[in-house]
Amino acid sequence: MNIFVVIQQMCVLLVMMLIGYIVFRIGWLDGNACSRMSKIVVNVLNPCLMVYGVLGKEANLDRTMLVQTLVLVVIYFGILILLSGPVASFLHVKREHYNLYKLMLIFSNVAFMGIPVVSSIYGKEAILLIAFYNLGYNLLLYTYGFCLAGKGGIQWKKLINPGVISCVVAIAVFASGISMPDSVCTFFDYVGNAAVPLSMILIGASVSQGGKKEFFLDKKMYAFMAVKMLAIPICAALLLKLVPWPSLVEGVFVLMLAMPVGSMVVMLAAESGNDAIECTKGSILTTLVSVLTIPIISTFLQF
């Protein structure tokens, strides 16, 4: 991995975020429009991009890499769940924020930001690997995540959504080796490619919409970011050097660990009556700092 390529790609994504920030500030977008567009990205564009990652025939993956990825997905969520409690305790967060910090550590933005970042660095061949992380994210969010937020029991019905379906379809198509007509591939290519710029524009708009000056004065949140955005992914990158697995598999794993707090955590906190402001703060600050931390993390993938 060329660190200069990573920096260039992150700068491109940063400019897209800046566009979103500006268009929201000048009133071309408002909260209602962002909410509706987010639904389009999550339920239409990202699923199409996920499927195209397989249909496009750009991936040089074998089934061994998929098995390795599946193992790392289990390790990924296992590590974050195990670390979430000690990290929250170490930071001495308020009792009412304890589970929120656990949620913020476990549920990163593996889709909305993970897909644009990883695909821009590794290409569309990485999208199939991201599908496994998205599956794990959804399965865990609507089960353990809802219980952790105190929202009640497992939300089985919400597990059936376009994101999960597209992940299953992508994996099934790859496993079966089905060949699709060029027109089908072109459709998923055109629609899916819109996901990257629109996702980043909406992230920039969310920063403009929710960012407050006092967010930048929370020392505890900076300590949280140091652990989540640097310490954990750097340790993972160094430890994975002991395992002779493909760099793509290891790189996707480490970058998934380096993703910022997911926006779904904010929504879940709000719906369950918790302090959504704390989660909003975590989501916005980790998203902003990721522009700097992801290139830093990438240097450790080169050793």
Image: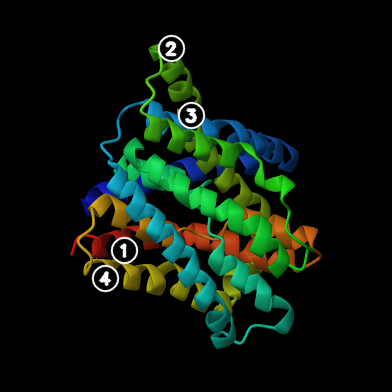
Do tag 4 and tag 2 residues touch (Cβ < 8 Å)?
Answer: no
Counting residues from the N terminus, which is met first, the one under dot 1 or under dot 3? Answer: 3
Work out whether residue 56 or residue 121 is closer to the camera in this orientation and state it: 56
Counting residues from the N terminus, which is met first, the one under dot 4 or under dot 1? Answer: 4
Instruction: Provide the residue designation for mark 3.
Output: 192
Counting residues from the N terminus, which is met first, the one under dot 4 or under dot 2? Answer: 2
Q: CA distance from mark 2 to mark 1?
A: 40 Å
| Spot occupied by residue 96 in the image (x, y as percentages of width and height) | 74, 78
Badge 1: few (under 14), some or many (20 or more) residues near its Cα, within 10 Å?
Answer: some
Q: CA distance from mark 2 to mark 3?
A: 14 Å
* Residue for point 37% across, 58% down: 253
Identify residue type, mark 1. Answer: Ile
Do tag 2 and tag 3 residues touch (Cβ < 8 Å)?
Answer: no
- Of circles 4 and 1, which is in front? 4
Identify residue type, mark 2. Answer: Ser
Counting residues from the N terminus, which is met first, the one under dot 4 or under dot 3? Answer: 3
Counting residues from the N terminus, which is met first, the one under dot 2 or under dot 1? Answer: 2
Work out whether residue 230 or residue 68 is closer to the camera in this orientation and state it: 68
Q: Is residue 197 left or right of residue 294?
A: right
Instruction: Provide the residue designation for mark 1.
Output: 296
* Residue for point 48% across, 29% down: 192
Q: Secondary structure at mark 1?
A: helix
Instruction: Provide the residue designation for mark 4.
Output: 238
Q: CA distance from mark 4 to mark 1?
A: 13 Å
Q: CA distance from mark 1 to mark 3?
A: 28 Å
* Residue for point 69% across, 76% down: 97
Q: Secondary structure at mark 4?
A: helix
Identify residue type, mark 4. Answer: Leu
Badge 2: few (under 14), some or many (20 or more) residues near its Cα, within 10 Å?
Answer: few
Instruction: Provide the residue designation for mark 2.
Output: 183
